[in-house]
Structure formats: C-alpha cells, structure tokens
Amino acid sequence: MATPPLVDAAGHAEGTRSELHSAELNCLSATLQRELCDRLQTDVAEETLLLFVADHGQTDSRPDENVDNEFCERMGEHDSGSLGEQAFESTPRRRFLAGAAGTCLLSGIGTGIATGGQSDGDTESSAGEELWRVDYETPDPLGRPYLSSVADGSLFVSNLDTVHALSASTGDEEWQFGVDDTEFHDQPIVVDGTVYATSHVFSDRDVEDTAVYALDADTGEQKWQFDDYDVTVAPIHVAENTVFIPKQFCVTAVDADTGDHRWDFKVGYGIETRLKVKMDSFAETDSGTFYVADIEGNVFAVDVASGEEEWRADVGMGVTTDLSVVDDTLFLGAVDSETDQPSNFQYYVSALDATTGEERWRFTVNSEPDTERPELEFVTVFDDTLYVGTDDCYDHPTCANLYAIDAESGEEKWQFAADNSVDTVTRADGTLFVGTALGEGDEGVVHAIEPETGTERWSFHAGYFLLSPITVVEDTLFTATQTNTDYEDAYRLNALDTATGEEQWNFVTDSNISEPRFADGSVFFSADRATVHALDAGVEGSNEDTSN
C-alpha cells in the first residue's frame, strides 16, 4: 500500500511523497487518531505530531495484524512528554509527518486527501484501493459533484457555485473558478484545451436564467461567457467547433472559440404547446449536420454552419430513445397510436435515411391488440447489428427484452429475455454486456451475451439497482449498483472479470455513485453528495471520452 502526500497547515497537499506505510499509525486507537486529526487541522508542525504519538503510543496501543509492530514498539519506548531521536532513525520526521497527516480525512473545499498515492520505492497499490479523495464543505442538496472525463492529467469537477480542476494523480487542486449566486449542475465538458460549464440561477420556484462559461483548462481563466435568459433542458453539446445549447423552444448555437451567438433553431414548427427539446435525442455527423427530436415526434436535420433545416420527419406521437447515426442511417425508437389508450400504443424502431429523412424500414416490437406495450429504452448499433432494449411491463413476451436487429434490413436476428427493464448495453472483446434495472428478487443483473446468437455466457446479480452505464476497460467491467437491506441502502462500484463475471473488487459508499471516469489505471467518481473518489482500477487503460 502506498501513502499520501504531505498536507500543509491549510489542509492542502504539497505533492511530496512519503515512504512510510500508512497502516503503521494504527498503533493509535481510533479515538486517539481522531484526536490527532483534530490537532493537525490547527497545528501541523512535526513536533506536534511526533510528541503526540510518543505520548500515546504505549498507553493506548491497539495494533491490528497488518501494523508494523516494530514501529509501534518504538513508539512505546518513550515516556509521556519525551521524544528520543533514536526511535525515528529509520523514519525521517518529514516522512513520518506526511504519513500521519494523510490519514486524517480533512474536510475542506479543494482539499485533496490522498489515502494511497504512488510513492518511490513503495509497493504498488492494489485494485480497488482508494488513492485519494476530495471532500467538499457543503454537500450539493440536488445530488453530487459532477465530473468531466480526464484531460491532460486533470479532472474537472462542478460543485455548487464552483468549477474545480484537480490533479488526476494526486487530487491536488490546480485551480478553481467560482460564480456567486449561481450553481453548476451539469458535468463540465473538455474539448481542445477548453472547459465548458453551464450555470443556473435558481429562484424559489424555478430556474431563472442560464450562462455558459468557457475556461482555459490549464489556468482556469475565463475565455468567454454566454448569458441566456431562457432555461436549458439538457446538458450542452460541443461539436464542429460549436456549442449547442438546448432550451425549451429552440437550440442555440454559439461559437466554441469566441462565445459569439451564431443562430437559433426553433423546434416544433406549428405546435403551440410548450415544447422541450429532447437534447438527449441528439446526434451529429462529420458531414456538418446535427439531428434533434422534440417530444411531439418530430425529427429535424439541421446544418451546423447555418442553422438551416435540411429536413424534418414526423415519426409518430413521440420519440422514446436517443438518436443513433451510423453511416447514412438514423435510428430511433418511437411510439404512435390512433387513440389515447395505452393498450393501443405501438412501439417501434424506425430507420431513416440521414440525408433525406425518408423511412427505410420499421420494426414493431408489439402489435397484439389490447395488451400493455413495452416502451423502448434505447437503440444502439455495433458493427452491422442494431440492439434495442425494452422496459418491464406485465405478463407479455415482449416486455424486458433485448432485440438484435439487422441494421440494413430491419430483420430480427434474435431476442434475449432479460430479468427486467433493459437499461444499458455495450460491446467489448466479442461479448455483449447488458444491464437491467431490477430483476428477480429485486436485483439488477449484468448479463454477458454471445452477440451472434443471443446465448447467455454468464450473469452477475448486482443488487437492487444499476446506477450507471456499463463500462469495459481492458478485461474488467465496471458498473455502479445500489443494494437495499432491511436497515440501510448500500452503494457500490463493482469491478467484474469480463470472461467469467466474477467480482474482482467493490468499493462501498453511503449514497449514489456517478458514472465512473477512467485514466491511466485509475477510476474516478463522485458519491456521498460531496466527495470525489479516485481508486486503483486494476487496469492500465482508459475509456474513451464520454463526457460529451
């Protein structure tokens, strides 16, 4: 196990490394460790720490089996109030001070508290071990800190009225950018050395206005600010050197370099009711076109440069999934009905020509009359196959299924009966990994499926609920789960072997876990409403940038 960096009197990590094994401080009881931490917050001088341990190491020693007993015995050789230099010949004062100070989980804005950074000459940390954590003073009442993907060794965090840049390796704060009387409630987006963050001003009743900030990723200096007095309904999207801002009635485009307004595209022509842009149903292509759907079942293709409509298509009553564009085809899930009765709703997958909007084929999930219809949860394409997940409903064979459909013809290849609503799917190393929200015995389940036949290879019962999409890095699958007991809820980040489904490790927190981010063998996530964690992921690679 490696040990944390030195923490100065203000609670900030200095970035030096200690070779002292942090478990050696367990020769102090938990009570004395808390007392030591309290004292270090006001006086971190080395004499304070060394005298404290020398005073108490003998009379209140409760070492466990992992403690360096020789160290504890040396601590116990000294009477209260005395300190013999010979006791620390193999433990230089500054190294000892660093190791002890790092065990105190000090709470403060931007305070990087490392519980296992890398040290020269020390042993490697083990998979699932916490490398560092940052605790913020005020928990976010609406959730938790929002994380970007790691870019150039930095992790960007939005929490309440501040955006923080943290060193991904140590948790040290590199800079912070704050705005009074506002709150950042979306994850920062990092593109080409710029951090884009969206803030909202809240009143007692609603969001009053929105601003988008562009910050230099290295320094935190503001490049530009775009104020908009409408309300965003989904996170911003950055592509084609353009920032797309989804609002209630339109999409606004802003120049990503300057913040200059380019154009507004109204969504829902001829519809007088209050609209919301389904910006999660958003996709763009390299050809300079973006696609967006509204809640009334209209799909629009828009030129990125001019904001002019290229085509629009009416696909039914509404769009129920994200949009997925592959080559020259746009895939989506939709619903339609001739009446308002749910039993008459028809859910289907529609494949549109991405250049004209014409429908190429339609795959209907359920056409039986007077039965509850399963809503489509997602559509996604891997290779030449489109995968469609349905939600749970009552006793009907098409509920809680995963469908594999030929992306060219729309013909069904196979279907897999899952435990409950199929919420997430990914493909890696010749295996399809599927996550369900709830399953038998109120459990979420991860399934490994053979993609050509739909045959199950293994399953992992993950707990009550899957909290995040499935992510695969090298030969390890990661997902966040929630488990309910009679007494409390437990939240875990699980790491599974992709070949067998066996759990390699898990990390437990007290509240919801965000979607994990990966870089250089570490995994990052937020939890407990005000904490950012960094763990040894047990892998060397990183996942793709999924923050945008």
Image (cartoon, grey):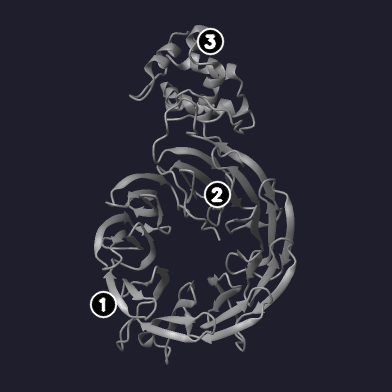
- Element at badge 2? loop
Residue at far bottom of view:
338
Residue under label 2 = 150
Sequence order check, earlier mark of 2 and 3? 3
Left or right of residue 538: residue 120: right
- Element at badge 3? loop
Q: Badge 3 local density, few (<14 within 10 Å), some, or many (20+)? A: few
Q: Would you say the residues marked 2 and 3 are in contact, meaning their CB atoms lie under 8 Å apart?
A: no
Q: Which mark is residue 81?
A: 3
- Rendered-image quadrant of the N terminus: top left
Marks 2 and 3 sit apart, C-alpha to C-alpha, by 47 Å
Q: Would you say the residues marked 2 and 1 are in contact, meaning their CB atoms lie under 8 Å apart?
A: no
Name the foreground residue: 156 vs 75: 156
**In the image, which is nearer the foreground, mark 3 or mark 1?**
1
Question: Image point 32% across, 83% down: which residue?
Answer: 366
Marks 2 and 1 sit apart, C-alpha to C-alpha, by 43 Å
Q: Which mark is residue 397?
A: 1
Sequence order check, earlier mark of 3 and 1? 3
Q: Amino acid at mark 3?
A: Gly
Name the foreground residue: 62 vs 448: 448
Residue 69 is situated, as x and y percent measured from the top left of the image, at 37, 17
Q: Is residue 145 visible?
A: yes
Occupied quadrant, residue 331: bottom left
Relative vertical location of residue 1 with respect to residue 461 in this rendering, above or below = above
Relative vertical location of residue 315 with respect to residue 402 in this rendering, above or below = below
Q: Amino acid at mark 2?
A: Val
Q: Badge 1 local density, few (<14 within 10 Å), some, or many (20+)? A: few
**In the image, which is nearer the foreground, mark 2 or mark 3?**
2
Sequence order check, earlier mark of 2 and 1? 2
Question: Image point 66% across, 59% down: which residue?
Answer: 199
Residue 530 is situated, as x and y percent measured from the top left of the image, at 54, 47
